Image (spheres, rainbow, N blue to C red):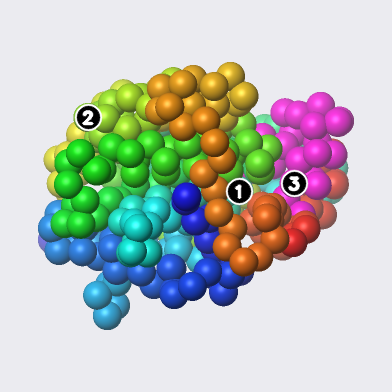
Amino acid sequence: MKTAWFGKRKETLEDGVIQSLCYLHQEALKEDRQELAGVIQTAIEQTEHLIPATVSLSRDSKDLLQQFLLLRGFQALDAIQKELFLREIESMPNG
Amino acid sequence: MIDCVSIATVHHFPDNLLAEQHSLRYREVVHKENWSDIYVIDGMEFDQYDNLATEYLIARDGQGRVVGVTRSYPTTIPYMLSDVFTFLLSSQVPSTPRIFEASRLVLDRSLLTREERRPVIDRLIVAYMERGLQRGIDAYAGFMLPKIWSSTFQRAGWDVQWLGPEISLPKTNEVVRAALMPVSREMERKVRDATGIHHSVLNFGAGPLQRNPGTAAYSHMREEMRQAA
């Protein structure tokens, strides 16, 4: 019983850490604080490695993590690719 | 032909193809395979990746009955591999408009004999390639049993790139492997040569010949990306 309670508490803690870091990453980018965003990015990546595969993250964390992944991928692109990327995520039904 | 259907285009086709593919999936994966932890309603199987962003490739027989289905889903919003199966990936989780997730490759094993299944799989795989090229994507990502990889995509000439080792799923102990399926003209040639299908297989029903929807994204992401650019 004690183990289950501890496990749940630890899972909640891990979920909270990921959520907070992803949120901070977004805020740092919004404020154009690239260096800080880079530090937080590293922290998120290291935290991801520490979280066991069995941990099921909350919907909010999954959403924030997905946005982090998208932003990280986006930042690695050159200017032309970035413009293309932005166009691609827009809904452009041509039917 | 393979019908390319989404919630936005289902009215271009006779019958309710989306409901029929959900029924097929129920018959095959719930009734025969006993999958658990998935949603069902009225004899149809579905999950959270069946929504506006999903595109289905549907095979029908000469009588119009749905005999095969598979689906694609964007990796720009949470998807099956990123949501539940990240432990299958040795490298970064793909998240880009240029990679879609491929999943739920299901055939009607009651209507199709063993000999009839292969041509249906081949057409579905060629449809994946054709649609991928139309949408300008670089690859699909997905996971399945190694023996299914070899009897479907690999047999059809598609050179898959492994995204991780073979891993046993925690609940079922089934061994699966994640892979990337590159989409390119060169790969198309290989797939068409291996399957012998050199004509277009996609059908968009009574609607426009080809409809290229945008990629699903979070509503606020464009602004954030502008900032990040």
Quadrant, the C terminus of chain B: top right
Report if residue A10 lies within the magenta region.
Answer: no
Helix, strand or loop under label 3: helix
Q: Residues within 10 Å of mark 3 (few under 14, many from 20)?
A: many
For discs 3 and 2, the disc positioned in front in the rendered view: 2
Q: Amino acid at mark 3?
A: Glu
Residue drawn at (78%, 58%) of the image? A94
Q: Is residue B216 left or right of residue B29?
A: right
Q: Which residues are magenta?
A: A70-90
Q: Can see residue B36?
A: no
Do residues under tags 2 and 1 come within 8 Å of each other at their CB atoms? no
Near-viewer residue (A62 or B113): B113
- Name which residue type carries label 1: Thr
Residue position marked by numbered label 2 in the rendering: B147
Q: Chain of mark 3?
A: A
Measured Cα–Cα span from mark 1 to mark 3: 11 Å
Which of the 4 image quadrants contains residue B144? top left
The relative height of residue B78 versus residue A78 in the rendered view (above or below) is: below
Residue B199: give x, y in percent of width and height. Answer: 54, 36
**Disc nearest the viewer among 2 and 1:** 2
Q: Residues within 10 Å of mark 2 (few under 14, many from 20)?
A: few
Residue B45 placement (x, y as % from top left): 30, 67
Q: Residue at x 53, y 69 (%)?
A: B13
